[in-house]
Image: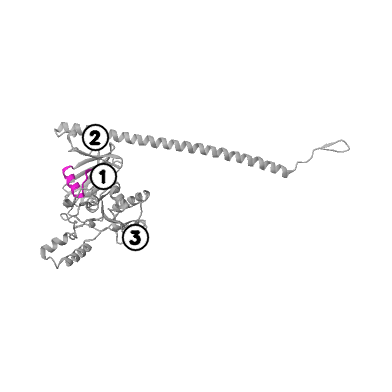
Amino acid sequence: MRINTNKKVHKMKRDPYKMLLRLAGILAAVVVVGIGVLYLCTLAVNSDYVSTRERIEAENAEAEVEFYTQLNELRSQNAAAKENESGIVDSADLPSWEKELAGSVWRVEDEGSIGLENTSTITLDRASLINGGLLLVNAWHSLPNDFSEEGLISVGQTSGFDIQVQDNSVQLFQPAYDGLKEAMDAAKEDGLEYFIAMEGYRSVAEQEALFSEEMQDLSSRYSDERLIAETKKKVNYPGTSDYHTGMTVRMDVYQRGNSELNDQKFQAESAQGAWLTENCWKYGFVFRFPSKDFPNSKWEDKSYKTGVSSQLNMYRFVGKAHSAAMRVLDMCLEEYIEFLIAHPHICIYENGALVYEVVRINGAGDNSSFALPVPNPANSYQASLDNMDGVVMAYSYK
């Protein structure tokens, strides 16, 4: 305050600039406190969200296991009831096959004459079934006349050359490509790279050229029927090569400038070959032509069934349900289809939980379309002609 000589008191005017600074400071403090509170609230909400999500996921996983356990029990009870009513052999007497694979116990069970439950019907055309994955093509079962190359894709271009290829001619159908990509990604996670796809789909015309070339080479030693027979020992007769399916790929290893790796025998010496042969079933592939001591001495020689004794690094896509079953059963493709003819309804379990169900329906003939059953609650299905007058349906419950 200021006092004049006349003793009157006057109030001093406040500095507006100082007042503004003070107000700004107060507002800044409020903002800082607000941000801090908001941050703490966000942390609390996020923490609660994460813990809630983890709890829900755990509960869902437990519920899923419980659901499939109950489903398996109901299937068994229903099967036993139906078999007892009809006088068919009790389910306990039906065969089953079991093997430990990748730390899990896998079991294949014959379901006998028990049919699928709670099914809906889908209609598929013959063209899609031919490329379903289980088409058998060998010396005794030729490629169907109505087979089409439509749908083949370039492995190199489609993968952005993430999968090495010998050249752009390496082609597969989409399911086989997807399985190969999944396998290569898994191998990379395990520290293995430098796989190379050497060959995929081979046309009948290409096979004819190879067969003629081999015949020419052998023509100085053999003639007539003997010449053809000797040629078949080295090159499949046109129309009978597994390459025709577009589901088979021949693999090797390659790294530019690495002669030590490139000179390795894929099966006997490379870590890549050992890994792929051991793990390919997880991604829907099977080693196509096991022969004597090939891919290694642990494998049974199947050349008497496949008709191929050459050592070929060929992997055939059949789908995850079938590859798991074939691995448990130690069967090649020829044996497996014969097995399904004898056991047209099987279930495949991992650690006691149903993961796949396979049904073979006989009498495919030359039908142009098929009405096929899909059980609930199957998550997905795979449908294929087997080239032995059957349609094979594989249902996934994973």
Is label 1 or label 3 in front?
Answer: 3
**For this rendering, which residue is in front, 279 or 206?**
279
Residue at 18% from the left image edge and 45% from the top image edge: 339
Residue at 34% from the left image edge and 34% from the top image edge: 63
| SS at mark 3 in the image | helix
Residue 75, numbered circle: 2
Magenta span of residues: 324-343
Is label 2 or label 3 in front?
Answer: 3
Q: Which badge, 2 or 1, is on the more N-terminal residue?
A: 2
Category of crowding for the residue at label 3, using alpha-carbon neighbours closer than 10 angstroms: few (below 14), some (14–19), many (at least 20): few
Category of crowding for the residue at label 2, using alpha-carbon neighbours closer than 10 angstroms: few (below 14), some (14–19), many (at least 20): some
Q: CA distance from mark 2 to mark 1?
A: 21 Å
**Residue that numbered label 1 is attached to:** 324
Q: Which badge, 1 or 3, is on the more N-terminal residue?
A: 3
Q: CA distance from mark 2 to mark 3?
A: 56 Å
SS assignment for the magenta stretch, majority: helix
**Residue that numbered label 3 is attached to:** 259
| SS at mark 1 in the image | helix
Category of crowding for the residue at label 1, using alpha-carbon neighbours closer than 10 angstroms: few (below 14), some (14–19), many (at least 20): many
Quadrant assignment for the C terminus: top left
Is label 2 or label 1 in front?
Answer: 1
| Residue 194 place in picture, x, y as percent | 35, 56
Q: Are marks 2 and 1 in contact (CB under 8 Å)?
A: no
Q: Amino acid at mark 3?
A: Ser
Position of 185 with respect to 43 (left or right) is: left
Is 270 magenta? The answer is: no
| Residue 94 place in picture, x, y as percent | 18, 36
Q: Amino acid at mark 2?
A: Arg
